[in-house]
Amino acid sequence: MNSRFTIGRALVIGVAWAAILFLLLPLLVSVPVSLTPNDYLSMPGGAMSTRHYAVLFEDDGWLASFLQSGVIALASAAISVTLGTLCAIGLWKIASPRGEAVRLVILFPLIVPPIVSALAFYRLWADWRLLDSYTGTILAHVVLTVPYVVVSVSTSLATLGLKVEQASRNLGANLYQTLRHVILPLIRPGVLSATIFAFILSWDELVVTLFISSRHIYTLPRRMWDGMRENVDPAIAAVSTLMLVATCAAIALSLARRRTAGEL
């Protein structure tokens, strides 16, 4: 019996690692391709070159896209973390069927296919004259990232009891003082994780941005998409590699903070 259990467990672990490696393989291909000395996407033969990385910092178009993506991601992450954290705390305090209905509405963007969300944003933003604007793009990204913030912060709040807030109020603290000095410090790891994920999601968002932007808003994912359609440039592989490294570093930082805080 034990031998069968050991074999089955080893088989499951082997299949899981095979699936992970299969999913990571396309990402790992971009690293050597970004080092090709050729002007087209190809694996480097013998020689390797970093000139495609240099292009990213010399071309004004790439730099502008980096800057736009950074500004939009920072702004949308700040807004979504603020709104999502307050919403998660409110739902934590209510804990009623009505609160669960509100949570379902907030998490609805996670269920809707991106193309449907993009069409809805395009129709609504056209009426509000928010197409191809920083305001419209940031608001769209906020709507898409708030559900992830609510989920992350709610996970941290699940480890707290309402008695913590009640004790603070009984000791004379008002609602603002309780929120700032008691609740937020206790759920700080969840808030930091939500901030990182909100930034990454906004930085990588493409489908909705394609629908609601044209000339003025030209984010990095959109430039990469247009580059793949019009001119297959190895600089795209260099950007992908940099984004992969940055994403892995952000996730590792988030996991390290949560492990330090004892959430993992």
Image (spheres, grey):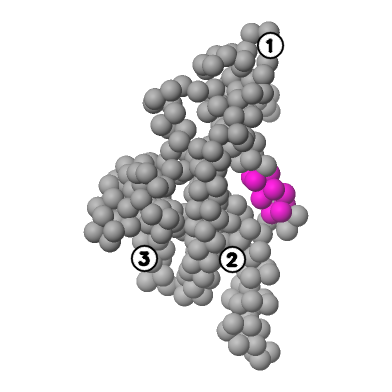
Kindly identify the residue that appears in the image at 59 percent across and 66 percent down: 157
Mark 2 or mark 1, whichever is nearer to me: 1
Residue 252 located within the stretch drawn in magenta: yes
Query: In which quadrant of the rendered image does the N terminus lie?
Result: top right
Kindly identify the residue that appears in the image at 46 percent across and 43 percent down: 219
Residue 74 located within the stretch drawn in magenta: no
Disc number placed over residue 101 in the picture, else none? 3
Type of amino acid under label 3 = Ala
Check disc 1 and report the residue beneath it.
47
Residue 15 drawn at (x, y percent): 57, 24
Check disc 2 and report the residue beneath it.
157
Judge from the rendering whether residue 218 lies leftward or rightward of residue 203; answer left or right.
left
Q: How far is disc 1 from disc 3 in space, using C-alphas?
A: 59 Å
Magenta residues, dominant SS class: helix
Residue 107 drawn at (x, y percent): 41, 57
Asked if one can make out residue 140 in the rendered structure from this viewpoint, the answer is no
Query: Which stretch appears magenta?
Result: 250-259
Kindly identify the residue that appears in the image at 67 percent across and 76 percent down: 182
Give SS at disc 3. Answer: helix
Disc number placed over residue 156 in the picture, else none? none
Q: How far is disc 3 from disc 2 in space, using C-alphas?
A: 18 Å
